[in-house]
Amino acid sequence: MAAYWKAVARQLGTAVFDIIFVAVLSLAPFLLGRLAIVLKQSDQWEEYWSFLFNGQLSFFAMGSLATLLLLCFRKKLPDMATIWIGAFSVCCMLFLITLVGYDPTLQGGQSFIGRWALYLYVFVLAVRILADAMKSVGAGDALQAGSDAAARSQRQLSERMGSGQ
């Protein structure tokens, strides 16, 4: 099991880059659109990041959750991860449906809905990074882990046989 998690850890760098790259490009209309407004009116800098707390990130989180569910449905992850990530995704989707259903116009903005949408979006991105790294662990990694375990067992057996004489 430790060998599997080491293989996942080796994939984390690529997974972080991929997920953050997509997230930044997805948020580009907010980031660049707001930047244009701020550059025109220099007194708007304190409101530049307000889009993070107005609840709109709940829609971005829903898209990421759909991606996680698709990974689960297609069995791209180990069985236990599929169960946990699938259950997490469904629970988060139900939570987001409740949040947006409570205030579909997102007029509650900077309050409870906006904060929780941001927290959930960041957490979902972290789970997507982990799932992407897990998905990238291939059969070669499993074969290498098996070979390493067999070599370790053979070495330990040789040491015992040598010390018993």
Image: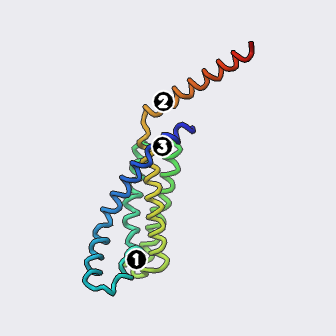
Q: Amino acid at mark 3?
A: Val
Q: Earlier in the sequence, mark 2 or mark 3?
A: 3
Which residue in the rendered view is the most extreme toward the top? 165
Say which mark, if any, is on residue 115: none
Q: Residue at x 39, y 69 (%)?
A: 57
1 vs 3, front mark: 3
Residue marked by disc 3: 8
- Distance between the alpha carbons at the discs numbered 1 and 3: 35 Å
Q: How many marks?
A: 3
Say which mark, if any, is on residue 54: 1
1 vs 2, front mark: 2
Residue 23 on image: x %, y %: 35, 61
**116 left or right, relative to 70:** right
Q: Residue at x 65, y 20 (%)?
A: 157
Q: Earlier in the sequence, mark 1 or mark 2?
A: 1
Colour mapping used in the image: rainbow
Residue marked by disc 2: 144
Q: Amino acid at mark 1?
A: Asn
Q: Is residue 78 above or below residue 145?
A: below
Residue 140 on image: x %, y %: 43, 31
Q: Name the residue nearer the viewer: 2 or 39.
A: 39
Q: Residue at x 29, y 76 (%)?
A: 35
